[in-house]
Image (cartoon, rainbow, N blue to C red):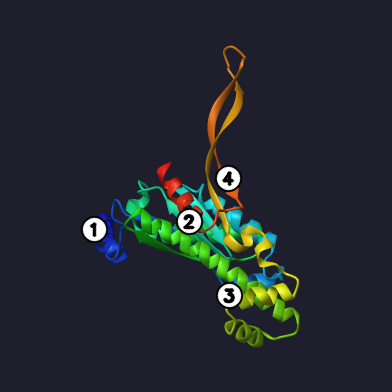
Amino acid sequence: MKFDELDEKMRVFETAHDLCVLPGVYMVARIDGRGFTRLTKEVHAFESPFDVRVRDLMVATTEHLMNCGFRVVYGYTQSDEISLLFHPQEDSFGRKTRKLNSILAGEASAKFSLLLGDLGAFDCRICELPNVELVRDYFRWRNEDAHRNALNAHGYWSLRREGKDAAEATSAMQRLSVAQKNELLFQRGINFNELPNWQKRGTGLYWETYAKEALNPRTGEPVFAERRRIKVDYELPMKDAYSAFVLSLLEDA
Protein backbone atom coordinates (compact mmCIF):
# COMPACT_ATOMS: atom_id res chain seq x y z
CA MET A 1 0.00 0.00 0.00
CA LYS A 2 1.34 3.42 -0.96
CA PHE A 3 2.05 5.86 1.84
CA ASP A 4 -0.63 8.35 0.73
CA GLU A 5 -3.25 5.59 0.77
CA LEU A 6 -2.08 4.37 4.18
CA ASP A 7 -2.06 7.91 5.53
CA GLU A 8 -5.60 8.53 4.33
CA LYS A 9 -6.76 5.22 5.76
CA MET A 10 -5.29 5.74 9.22
CA ARG A 11 -5.79 9.51 9.62
CA VAL A 12 -9.53 9.06 10.10
CA PHE A 13 -8.99 7.16 13.35
CA GLU A 14 -7.14 10.17 14.75
CA THR A 15 -9.60 12.83 13.59
CA ALA A 16 -13.00 11.13 13.49
CA HIS A 17 -14.10 12.69 16.78
CA ASP A 18 -12.54 16.12 16.33
CA LEU A 19 -14.68 18.89 17.82
CA CYS A 20 -14.29 22.51 16.78
CA VAL A 21 -15.55 25.62 18.53
CA LEU A 22 -17.98 27.40 16.22
CA PRO A 23 -17.09 30.85 14.86
CA GLY A 24 -18.55 33.63 16.98
CA VAL A 25 -18.41 31.55 20.16
CA TYR A 26 -16.06 32.84 22.85
CA MET A 27 -13.37 30.48 24.11
CA VAL A 28 -11.93 30.33 27.60
CA ALA A 29 -9.30 27.74 28.48
CA ARG A 30 -9.20 26.55 32.06
CA ILE A 31 -5.91 24.94 33.02
CA ASP A 32 -5.66 23.14 36.37
CA GLY A 33 -2.70 21.72 38.25
CA ARG A 34 -2.69 17.97 38.88
CA GLY A 35 -1.84 16.88 42.43
CA PHE A 36 -0.67 20.36 43.41
CA THR A 37 -1.67 20.04 47.06
CA ARG A 38 0.84 17.26 47.49
CA LEU A 39 3.40 18.96 45.24
CA THR A 40 3.33 22.32 47.04
CA LYS A 41 2.55 21.24 50.60
CA GLU A 42 4.41 17.95 50.97
CA VAL A 43 7.08 17.56 48.30
CA HIS A 44 8.29 21.18 48.39
CA ALA A 45 6.71 22.35 51.65
CA PHE A 46 5.76 25.85 50.51
CA GLU A 47 4.16 28.08 53.11
CA SER A 48 0.48 27.39 53.86
CA PRO A 49 -2.07 28.47 52.91
CA PHE A 50 -0.41 30.84 50.42
CA ASP A 51 3.16 31.32 49.33
CA VAL A 52 4.26 34.20 47.14
CA ARG A 53 6.72 31.86 45.43
CA VAL A 54 3.90 29.65 44.16
CA ARG A 55 1.98 32.74 43.10
CA ASP A 56 4.96 33.91 41.08
CA LEU A 57 5.36 30.49 39.45
CA MET A 58 1.72 30.56 38.37
CA VAL A 59 1.97 34.15 37.12
CA ALA A 60 5.07 33.32 35.06
CA THR A 61 3.33 30.25 33.63
CA THR A 62 0.28 32.34 32.71
CA GLU A 63 2.48 34.94 31.04
CA HIS A 64 4.17 32.19 29.04
CA LEU A 65 0.80 30.90 27.83
CA MET A 66 -0.15 34.39 26.70
CA ASN A 67 3.02 34.50 24.60
CA CYS A 68 3.10 30.99 23.11
CA GLY A 69 1.31 31.63 19.84
CA PHE A 70 -2.34 32.26 20.69
CA ARG A 71 -4.22 35.56 20.79
CA VAL A 72 -5.08 35.80 24.48
CA VAL A 73 -6.94 38.87 25.72
CA TYR A 74 -6.84 38.10 29.44
CA GLY A 75 -5.11 35.66 31.74
CA TYR A 76 -6.32 35.00 35.28
CA THR A 77 -4.74 32.80 37.91
CA GLN A 78 -5.68 31.81 41.43
CA SER A 79 -4.46 28.87 43.51
CA ASP A 80 -3.31 26.17 41.03
CA GLU A 81 -5.54 27.20 38.12
CA ILE A 82 -5.25 29.47 35.10
CA SER A 83 -8.01 30.84 32.88
CA LEU A 84 -7.28 32.29 29.44
CA LEU A 85 -9.74 34.38 27.45
CA PHE A 86 -9.01 34.13 23.74
CA HIS A 87 -9.54 36.92 21.26
CA PRO A 88 -12.94 36.46 19.56
CA GLN A 89 -11.18 35.97 16.20
CA GLU A 90 -8.66 33.38 17.44
CA ASP A 91 -8.75 30.49 14.96
CA SER A 92 -5.53 28.54 15.50
CA PHE A 93 -5.80 24.88 14.47
CA GLY A 94 -9.30 25.53 13.18
CA ARG A 95 -10.43 25.99 16.81
CA LYS A 96 -10.08 22.23 17.39
CA THR A 97 -10.54 21.58 21.09
CA ARG A 98 -8.20 18.58 21.21
CA LYS A 99 -5.37 20.68 19.81
CA LEU A 100 -6.01 23.62 22.13
CA ASN A 101 -6.33 21.37 25.18
CA SER A 102 -3.22 19.32 24.50
CA ILE A 103 -0.97 22.25 23.53
CA LEU A 104 -1.98 24.48 26.45
CA ALA A 105 -1.68 21.65 28.99
CA GLY A 106 1.72 20.76 27.57
CA GLU A 107 2.99 24.34 27.50
CA ALA A 108 1.81 25.00 31.07
CA SER A 109 3.32 21.76 32.37
CA ALA A 110 6.64 22.37 30.65
CA LYS A 111 6.99 25.98 31.78
CA PHE A 112 5.97 25.35 35.39
CA SER A 113 8.27 22.31 35.64
CA LEU A 114 11.24 24.30 34.34
CA LEU A 115 10.58 27.09 36.81
CA LEU A 116 10.06 24.74 39.76
CA GLY A 117 12.86 22.34 38.89
CA ASP A 118 10.48 19.43 39.38
CA LEU A 119 7.59 17.84 37.52
CA GLY A 120 4.32 19.76 37.61
CA ALA A 121 1.45 18.67 35.38
CA PHE A 122 -1.67 20.49 34.20
CA ASP A 123 -4.84 19.50 32.42
CA CYS A 124 -6.93 21.79 30.22
CA ARG A 125 -10.50 22.11 29.05
CA ILE A 126 -12.07 24.63 26.68
CA CYS A 127 -15.21 26.44 27.82
CA GLU A 128 -17.42 27.51 24.91
CA LEU A 129 -19.37 30.65 25.81
CA PRO A 130 -21.94 32.00 23.33
CA ASN A 131 -22.07 35.63 24.52
CA VAL A 132 -20.10 38.27 26.42
CA GLU A 133 -22.41 38.06 29.42
CA LEU A 134 -21.34 34.46 30.00
CA VAL A 135 -17.69 35.44 29.57
CA ARG A 136 -18.23 38.04 32.27
CA ASP A 137 -19.99 35.51 34.49
CA TYR A 138 -17.22 32.92 34.00
CA PHE A 139 -14.53 35.25 35.32
CA ARG A 140 -16.81 36.54 38.06
CA TRP A 141 -17.31 32.90 39.09
CA ARG A 142 -13.57 32.20 39.29
CA ASN A 143 -13.00 35.49 41.14
CA GLU A 144 -15.63 34.63 43.73
CA ASP A 145 -14.25 31.09 43.98
CA ALA A 146 -10.85 32.54 44.84
CA HIS A 147 -12.45 34.59 47.63
CA ARG A 148 -14.28 31.59 49.07
CA ASN A 149 -11.20 29.35 48.83
CA ALA A 150 -9.00 31.94 50.53
CA LEU A 151 -11.36 32.26 53.48
CA ASN A 152 -11.58 28.50 53.86
CA ALA A 153 -7.83 27.98 53.44
CA HIS A 154 -6.87 30.55 56.06
CA GLY A 155 -9.38 29.09 58.50
CA TYR A 156 -8.31 25.51 57.84
CA TRP A 157 -4.61 26.20 58.27
CA SER A 158 -5.23 28.26 61.40
CA LEU A 159 -6.85 25.20 62.95
CA ARG A 160 -4.09 22.91 61.69
CA ARG A 161 -1.46 25.12 63.34
CA GLU A 162 -3.35 24.69 66.62
CA GLY A 163 -2.93 20.92 66.44
CA LYS A 164 -6.09 19.71 64.69
CA ASP A 165 -5.55 17.03 62.08
CA ALA A 166 -6.82 17.35 58.50
CA ALA A 167 -10.17 15.67 59.15
CA GLU A 168 -10.87 17.71 62.30
CA ALA A 169 -10.00 21.01 60.64
CA THR A 170 -12.09 20.20 57.57
CA SER A 171 -15.07 19.17 59.67
CA ALA A 172 -14.85 22.30 61.81
CA MET A 173 -14.79 24.61 58.80
CA GLN A 174 -17.74 22.89 57.13
CA ARG A 175 -19.99 23.75 60.08
CA LEU A 176 -19.26 27.49 59.96
CA SER A 177 -21.00 30.29 58.08
CA VAL A 178 -19.02 32.96 56.24
CA ALA A 179 -19.41 35.33 59.18
CA GLN A 180 -18.26 32.65 61.61
CA LYS A 181 -15.20 31.88 59.47
CA ASN A 182 -14.26 35.56 59.50
CA GLU A 183 -14.72 35.62 63.28
CA LEU A 184 -12.58 32.48 63.68
CA LEU A 185 -9.74 34.26 61.90
CA PHE A 186 -10.29 37.53 63.75
CA GLN A 187 -10.01 35.74 67.10
CA ARG A 188 -6.62 34.48 65.95
CA GLY A 189 -5.35 37.90 64.95
CA ILE A 190 -6.19 37.71 61.24
CA ASN A 191 -8.41 40.35 59.65
CA PHE A 192 -9.46 38.67 56.41
CA ASN A 193 -10.26 41.98 54.75
CA GLU A 194 -6.68 43.14 55.24
CA LEU A 195 -5.06 40.11 53.60
CA PRO A 196 -3.38 40.68 50.20
CA ASN A 197 -5.86 40.94 47.35
CA TRP A 198 -4.00 38.39 45.23
CA GLN A 199 -4.85 35.77 47.85
CA LYS A 200 -8.53 36.73 47.98
CA ARG A 201 -9.18 37.67 44.34
CA GLY A 202 -6.43 36.12 42.26
CA THR A 203 -4.13 37.81 39.77
CA GLY A 204 -4.96 39.21 36.34
CA LEU A 205 -2.68 39.58 33.32
CA TYR A 206 -3.60 41.71 30.33
CA TRP A 207 -1.99 43.71 27.56
CA GLU A 208 -1.14 47.38 27.89
CA THR A 209 0.44 49.81 25.45
CA TYR A 210 3.42 51.97 26.33
CA ALA A 211 5.75 54.37 24.56
CA LYS A 212 9.27 53.07 24.01
CA GLU A 213 12.00 55.59 23.29
CA ALA A 214 14.22 54.98 20.29
CA LEU A 215 16.40 56.92 17.86
CA ASN A 216 15.50 57.90 14.33
CA PRO A 217 18.18 56.11 12.25
CA ARG A 218 18.32 58.98 9.74
CA THR A 219 18.30 62.03 11.98
CA GLY A 220 19.51 60.57 15.27
CA GLU A 221 16.66 62.34 17.03
CA PRO A 222 14.73 60.61 19.82
CA VAL A 223 11.36 59.17 18.80
CA PHE A 224 8.74 57.14 20.58
CA ALA A 225 7.22 53.92 19.30
CA GLU A 226 4.09 52.32 20.68
CA ARG A 227 4.63 48.82 22.05
CA ARG A 228 2.59 46.22 23.93
CA ARG A 229 3.48 44.35 27.09
CA ILE A 230 1.72 42.24 29.68
CA LYS A 231 0.64 43.97 32.86
CA VAL A 232 0.40 41.84 36.00
CA ASP A 233 -2.38 43.12 38.27
CA TYR A 234 -2.37 41.98 41.90
CA GLU A 235 -5.14 44.43 42.85
CA LEU A 236 -8.12 43.32 40.79
CA PRO A 237 -11.43 45.08 41.40
CA MET A 238 -14.30 43.27 43.11
CA LYS A 239 -17.84 42.22 42.22
CA ASP A 240 -19.58 44.52 39.68
CA ALA A 241 -16.41 46.53 39.11
CA TYR A 242 -14.60 43.30 38.18
CA SER A 243 -17.39 42.35 35.78
CA ALA A 244 -17.09 45.74 34.08
CA PHE A 245 -13.32 45.33 33.91
CA VAL A 246 -13.58 41.97 32.11
CA LEU A 247 -16.05 43.39 29.59
CA SER A 248 -13.75 46.36 28.95
CA LEU A 249 -10.94 43.99 27.92
CA LEU A 250 -13.14 42.50 25.20
CA GLU A 251 -14.20 45.93 24.01
CA ASP A 252 -10.55 46.90 23.58
CA ALA A 253 -9.52 43.61 21.93
Question: At numbered mark 3, what does the secondary structure look like: helix, strand or loop?
Answer: helix
Q: Position of residue 73 (x, y in %)?
A: 46, 47
At x 26% / y 63%, what residue is drawn?
12
- Relative placement, left or right, of 37 versus 75 is right
- Relative placement, left or right, of 123 versus 162 is left
How many marks are shown on the rendered structure? 4
| Among numbered discs 2 and 3, the one appearing first in the sequence | 3
Q: Real-space Cα distance between discs 1 and 2?
A: 57 Å
**Disc 2: CA contacts within 10 A as few (<14), some (14-19) or many (>=20):** few
Q: Real-space Cα distance between discs 1 and 3?
A: 64 Å
Question: At numbered mark 4, what does the secondary structure look like: helix, strand or loop?
Answer: strand
The answer, for residue 235, to whether it is visible in the render is: yes
The three-letter code of the residue at mark 1 reads Glu
Question: At numbered mark 2, what does the secondary structure look like: helix, strand or loop?
Answer: helix
Q: Which residue is mark 1?
A: 5
| Among numbered discs 1 and 3, the one appearing first in the sequence | 1
Q: Which residue is mark 3?
A: 178
| Among numbered discs 4 and 3, the one appearing first in the sequence | 3
Q: Which mark is residue 240?
A: 2
